[in-house]
Amino acid sequence: MFFPTAFMVGLLTGIWQGGQLFSRKSALIKAEKEDLKAVLFFGRKPIKLVLFDIGGVFVDAELDRYVQLGCAAFQTNPNSLRREIAEKLPAFEMGKLDSESFWREIGESLWQSGEGSRSIVNNCADFWKNIFRATLTIDERLLQLTEELRRNGCAVGALSNTIAEHADILEEVGFYKYFDPCILSCRVGMRKPQAEIFKLAAQVAGVPLKQCLFVDDQSGNIKAAKSAGMDGLVFTSAEQLYKDLVQKKLLHAN
């Protein structure tokens, strides 16, 4: 029976370690070549950070449910209520209005225009939270996609217009642990499509704007992100997003 000597063991170990080092070095050289190719042939630096919108991407927006209950509370019609919500939502999403003030201003506007009553929804914060909690579904396929992006060396963050009540619930269920940075309009006092919020996200992440990719279901927000200096993708489905990220060399095709 052959018993390897200490010399042979050391030699074989050295060969194995050398092979591992060579493999890692080759992978690094390949990555650097890909980065260089992206700059030379496509005129851009490689993407280092993918930022995701949340509502309409990971989480379904249930505006119709809010409108239905709001119409009953204010004795108004859907079109009038949608108009008032659209007008006052930016301040609400930037944290400049709390739930009670938001609904009070809507009721006052509807009453002054003769389109509804001054009624205010009781326990406004609970009103938002209860609907959101009852209808909350998170796309697990997209969470898996974020994990794959990280394994491929790409940072993953969130950039979303939202209200405090919704942000609190997503924090409670541990959703935000998948994202760093996590830029929420209600906490930073700005919102999409303002250029400042895109610049803030890149600054917090420590990544140049040109190396950030933003994913959102609203084309207007993608246009704003590109104007700010980012790349962008309009989200239509998890399947299409996967294909788009493969095309951008951020994911490997299965």
Image: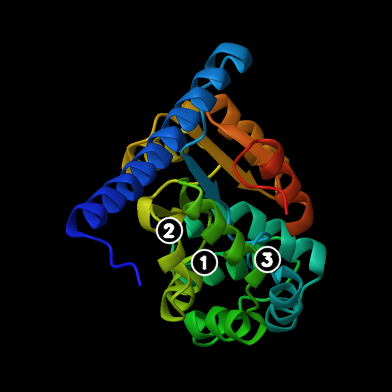
The kind of secondary structure element at disc 1 is helix
As drawn, 145 above or below 26: below
The amino acid type found where label 2 is placed reads Cys
Query: Vertically, is 33 above or below 136?
Result: above
Please provide percent x and percent y for residue 62.
Answer: 70, 72
Q: Is residue 179 above or below residue 46?
A: below
Vertical placement of residue 3 versus 89, above or below? below
Dot 3 falls on a residue whose secondary structure is: helix
**Residue under numbered circle 2:** 186
Residue at image x 72%, y 56%?
Answer: 83
Residue in view at x 51 percent, y 34 percent: 47
| Quadrant housing the C terminus | bottom right
Labels 1 & 3 near each other (Cβ < 8 A): no
* Callout 3 amino acid: Leu
Quarter-wise, where is residue 246 in the image? top right
Q: CA distance from mark 1 to mark 3?
A: 13 Å
* Mark 1 in CB contact with mark 2 (< 8 angstroms): no
Circle nearer the viewer, 1 or 3: 1
Q: Which residue is mark 1?
A: 102
Residue sitting nearer the eye, 101 or 246: 246
How far apart in space, not on screen, are marks 1 and 2 (Cα)? Answer: 13 Å
Q: Earlier in the sequence, mark 2 or mark 3?
A: 3
Q: Is residue 9 left or right of residue 216?
A: left
Q: Position of residue 191 (x, y in %)?
A: 49, 46
Any part of residue 11 in sight: yes
Q: Tell me where residue 171 appears, x and y as whole percent.
A: 42, 74
Could you classify mark 3 by the number of other residues whose Cα lies within 10 Å: few (under 14), some (14-19), or many (20 or more)? Answer: many
Give whichever of 248, 134 is nearer the camera: 248
The residue tagged 3 is 110
